[in-house]
């Protein structure tokens, strides 16, 4: 990639459309939980975002995906390899695309 002006970019930095604003605070996200200990509401969470680690807190678990029926089901916690929609409060700014904007899009 080439840029017209000098930009201080490091590994893990996000390049985004100038109309996108980094979010900080509460947002909904789809997550896959890889830790062996369950994720519960009010858990203090350390989020891997690109190569950066971002501290946050799980505010609410909206639903967990039942991988056999592909339906969202209520959940109080999620375990290893579970996919869920959660509300998370981040203490640092991150770039993300709201779930409603990506719904129905397939990965390319």
Image (cartoon, rainbow, N blue to C red):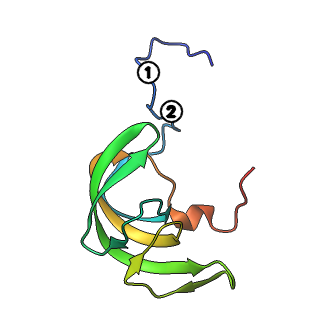
Q: Which mark is residue 9?
A: 1
Residue 43: name its quadrant: bottom left
Looking at the image, is 10 positioned above or below residue 90?
A: above
Q: Give the mark nearer the N terminus: 2 vs 1.
A: 1
When the figure is inspected, residue 6 is found, relative to residue 92, above or below; the finding is above
Question: Which one is nearer the viewer's eye here, 42 or 103?
Answer: 42
Q: Tell me residue 106's x, y (percent).
A: 73, 59
Residue 9 spot, x, y in % from top left: 44, 21
Q: Residue at position x 50%, y 60% from top?
A: 98
Along the line of sight, the residue nearer the viewer: 44 or 16? 44
Numbered disc 1: secondary structure: loop
Image coordinates of residue 46 in percent, x first then y, are: 31, 53
Question: Height in image: 67 above or below 1?
Answer: below
The local secondary structure at tag 2 comes to loop
Q: Image check: 2 left or right of 87?
A: right
Which residue is at the front of the view, 100 or 78? 78
Disc 1 crowd rating (10 Å Cα; few below 14, some 14-19, many 20+) is: few
* Total marks in image: 2
Residue at far bottom of view:
74
Give the residue displayed 61% in from the left and 15% down from the top: 2
**Horizontal side, residue 11 vs residue 57: left or right:** right
Label 2 belongs to which residue? 15
Which quadrant: the N terminus? top right
Task: Indicate whether 103 appears above or below 53.
Answer: below
* Mark 2 in CB contact with mark 1 (< 8 angstroms): yes
Q: Residue furthest front?
A: 36
Residue 10, given in percent of the width and then of the height, sits at: 43, 22
- How many neighbours does mark 2 have within 10 angstroms: few (below 14), some (14-19), or many (20 or more)? few
Whole-angstrom CA distance, mark 2 to mark 1, is 9 Å
At horizontal 46% and vertical 88% (from top left) the residue drawn is 74
- Residue at (71% x, 54% y) in the render: 107
């Amino acid at each position: 990639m080439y840029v017209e002006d000098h930009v201080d970019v490091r590994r893990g930095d996000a390049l985004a459309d100038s109309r996108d604003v980094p979010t900080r605070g509460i947002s909904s996200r789809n997550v896959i939980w890889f830790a062996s200990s369950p994720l519960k509401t009010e858990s203090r969470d350390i989020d891997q975002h690109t190569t950066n680690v971002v501290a946050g807190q799980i505010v609410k678990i909206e639903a967990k995906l039942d991988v056999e029926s592909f339906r969202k089901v209520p959940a109080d916690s999620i375990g290893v390899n579970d996919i869920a929609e959660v509300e998370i409060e981040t203490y640092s700014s991150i770039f993300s695309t709201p779930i409603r904007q990506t719904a129905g899009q397939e990965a390319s």
